[in-house]
Structure formats: C-alpha cells, structure tokens
Image: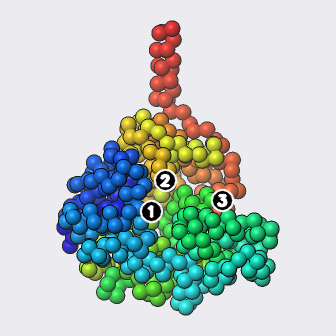
Amino acid sequence: MFRKMLIANRGEIAVRVVRACAEMGIRSMAIYSDADKNALHVKKADEAYRISAHPLNGYLNADKITSLAAALGCDAVHPGYGFLSESPLLPRYCARHGIKFVGPSAQSIERMGDKVAARALAETAGVPVVPGSKGALVNVNEAVKLAERIGYPVMLKAVGGGGGRGIRRCDNSDEVRHSFDRASSEARKAFGRADVFMEKCVVNPRHIEVQIIADGSGNIVHLFERDCSIQRRNQKLIEIAPSPQLTEKEREEVCSYAIQLALSADYQNAGTVEFLLDEDRRFYFMEMNTRLQVEHTVTEQITGLDIVQEQIRVAAGEPLSVRQKDIHHRGYAMQFRINAEDPRNDFIPSFGRITRYYAPGGPGVRTDGAIYTGYVIPPYYDSMCAKLTVWALSWEALVARGQRALADIVMTGIKTTIPYYQQILKHNDFRRGDFDTGFVAAHPELANVAPLRRTEDEALAIAAALVCHAGM
C-alpha cells in the first residue's frame, strides 16, 4: 500500500480523499493556490504546499504537480474530479516520476474522452448508441445534411467534451448553421480541440449512469445505477441511487451494458458509464467518465462501499475487496449539490463570506464540504460549496428526510440553491418519482420562491434594527 499521496485537487473532493487516506494509514499531501491558503483541505491534510499564486494554474500544471510529488516522497497522486482528472497528461507525468496515478491509464482516458471513439467502441461491444455522425463533422454543410437525414432535433457536441459542456441543441437547419461555429469555438476554448459531432436528440429522456470499478486481476463490478435526470443546462443538480424510475429488469440491462463497455475498453479503476433512457424505455450509451464522480456518495450510501478506498487499492495493484455477488443495494440515497447561486436571479453565482454555517445531522444524513463559518468562497472555481446526501429505506422516507435535512442547514452570508431544492421536493411529479431531464426547464416557477426566514434570522434582524435605532 502507498505511504504518501498527493491530492491534485481542492475543496470538498480533496477533503474526501484526505479522509480515505487517514483510514488507510496513508499520509496525505494537499496543494493550494493563494486563493485557497485558508481552505479546509489545507487544514485537514497531513502536509500542505503552495503550488501557485494564480488560482488555477497550479492545479492545471501536471509537470509541476508530479515534480513536487516526487520531490516530497509521494508514491501516488489522486486527481479527484475536474482539473486534470480526465487529462492523459497527469498519468503520463506520474509514470515519468515512478508515481502511481489513482485512476485509469492514459490510454483509457484518451480513448473514452474522445466521444466519437467511445461511440465506436460501444457499438463494437454491442451497446446501443444514439444515431449520429461516425466521426467529427467536417463543416456546417455536412452537419445540415446529416441532421436532415436523422431528423430534428439534433445535438451538436464537442468530441473532447464532458461535464455537460460543449453541447447545443438544434431544432432546424437555421439553428445548425447558427450553432456550428459557436460549438466549435466553445469546444476549442474548453477542451483544446474544435471538433464537434452530431447525435439525434433524445427528447425528455431519463439520464441514467452506472458506476463501475475494475482491478488489474480481471475483476470488474458494477455498483448499480444513479438517476441524474434533475439537471439544469446539462449540469446535474440532484442525483439518486438507485433510480426510482427503473424496473429490476431495466436495472440489470443497463448495468450489463456498462460492464460490456468497460470490458471492451480493458478498463481499470473507477469509471461511470452514462446512458439516456427514452420514452419507449430504450437505453442509449452517451459517454464514459474516466474519474470519480461528484455524485459517488449516493452509491456509497446504498452499497456500503468506499469507492475512493477501492480506487486506491486498485492503483496499488491490489484486488477489489468485493466481487459482484457480494454487492447489494439497500434503500435509496439522494444527493443535493449545494451551489452558491441565486435561484431567483437566473442562478447567478453568489460568492463571498459565509457568516454562519451549521451542517445538518441525524440518521441517514451525510455532508461533504470544505466550508466553515467565516470561510470566503472565492470567485475562481465552481460554485458548488457542499454536497448533502440523505439515505432512507423507502423512496417516500427519502423525500421526507431530504426535506428535513435541507431545512436543518444554516448557511448565511451567501445565496444558495437550498430553497430551490426544497421546492423540487414538494412537487407532485418528483414525489411520485416521475421526472426526466426536462423537469427543471418545465418548472421555472420553482426557482422564484423566496427562501423561508428562520425565527433566529428574524430575531437578529430586529436586534440589528434596534441597535441602529438606539444609535441615531
């Protein structure tokens, strides 16, 4: 097993890996930019080193990260998610320094990160794919001809894209012509290549993804599925495991597809295979994420497995701690991405100082975060500041527990998505477990409800007004 691990990330995922290392007896090393010098992952790790003055450059410099890891005696690097987690550069630089990368090989990252190559591999493996282009589109004229052949609506997607970025829906030829150059430009800026491809748009699908993990001894398992249909502009908001919308037969079908693809890709370590489920209950492969997912917590809650620790075991050359026959799911889990955003103002980011913060607790409640009272959320990173995960034996109990846990959170000084999630959980369609990727767009009214004022907040406001009045 490893002795010392550098965590090439920040925020809550860095804290998450620090905790896994502590339980496994591995010394953890954090890196930070000047913007993160007071961050929780810096305080929690066994060691912490300044990587850059710039908020982003250090976390994106594979050479600098691995050189530091080697100089300080680290024998492993965990990439977390985001930043360099899906770049083949980091595992390659790790190999140069004789350091283990906690993730798949550079070849797997490249193969599955190329959406066209991944589609081709899925077809070869017998996994159904959405009708679309065989490769990157040469020009806008080719795009228009293909769209007219497969039928509108269609999706233009960045070949090297991920995380819901670089995607544009087109409902007619004018929109294809208008969007093609913009999609190419966005792809170049976000992923370093301008190539885009096209897929038939599956209207109002369910977004279902399967967590898999494989070791170097030929053992590959799935950890069941997650439902990520509650999303806004292709960015996930609420994730659920297992999906309340699947039958047991459908669950077995989609999980077997994920295993087929991973076997064909000769994949090792943790990964997530994403699918769309259409209105006729047909699954289509969408993409594979070659890293730990933000929403891995819901899978951990229903299976009892620590996915980060399994990642580390695989990277160290050890077998998985379980076989497929040992893995079962119990109850339901739901994760809320608590974002520093104002739902009533088109979800504009709300960075700044957290004046008060209390995490929720009680049975079946888990909070993953990197915030505390007095912490200043910097404007340079993603707006997610915490993840709330709840678990219960039944779907109905899960919704009730989610409502209670969201009401328990105290987070003042910034605007958050907490009141928005409270409204979603009250909606009848959601409570019935009947929703798709169009749910958020179909219910804009849910974002316009003002957050409930707490009694303590009102008391503080009255006290402040009295102080001001007395001083006049």
Q: 10 Å neighbourhood of mark 3: few (<14), some, or many (≥20)?
A: some
Instruction: Identify the disc placed on residue 82.
Output: 1
Give the residue drawn at x 64%, y 85%.
134
Nearer the observer, 328 or 110: 110
The picture quadrant where one finds residue 314 is bottom left
Q: Which residue is mark 3?
A: 439
Question: Tag 3, which secondary structure?
Answer: helix
Q: Position of residue 93 (x, y in %)?
A: 33, 72
Q: Earlier in the sequence, mark 1 or mark 2?
A: 1
Task: Choose mark 2 or mark 3, whichever is in front.
Answer: 2
Q: Vertically, is 268 above or below 363?
A: below
Instruction: Identify the disc placed on residue 382.
Output: 2
Q: Vertically, is 442 above or below 94?
A: above
Find the distance from the CA under tag 1 to the CA under tag 2.
10 Å
Give the residue drawn at x 74%, y 80%.
142
Residue type pointed to by label 3: Phe
Give the residue drawn at x 48%, y 66%.
241
Q: Position of residue 292 (x, y in %)?
A: 41, 68
Residue type pointed to by label 1: Gly
Q: Earlier in the sequence, mark 3 or mark 1?
A: 1
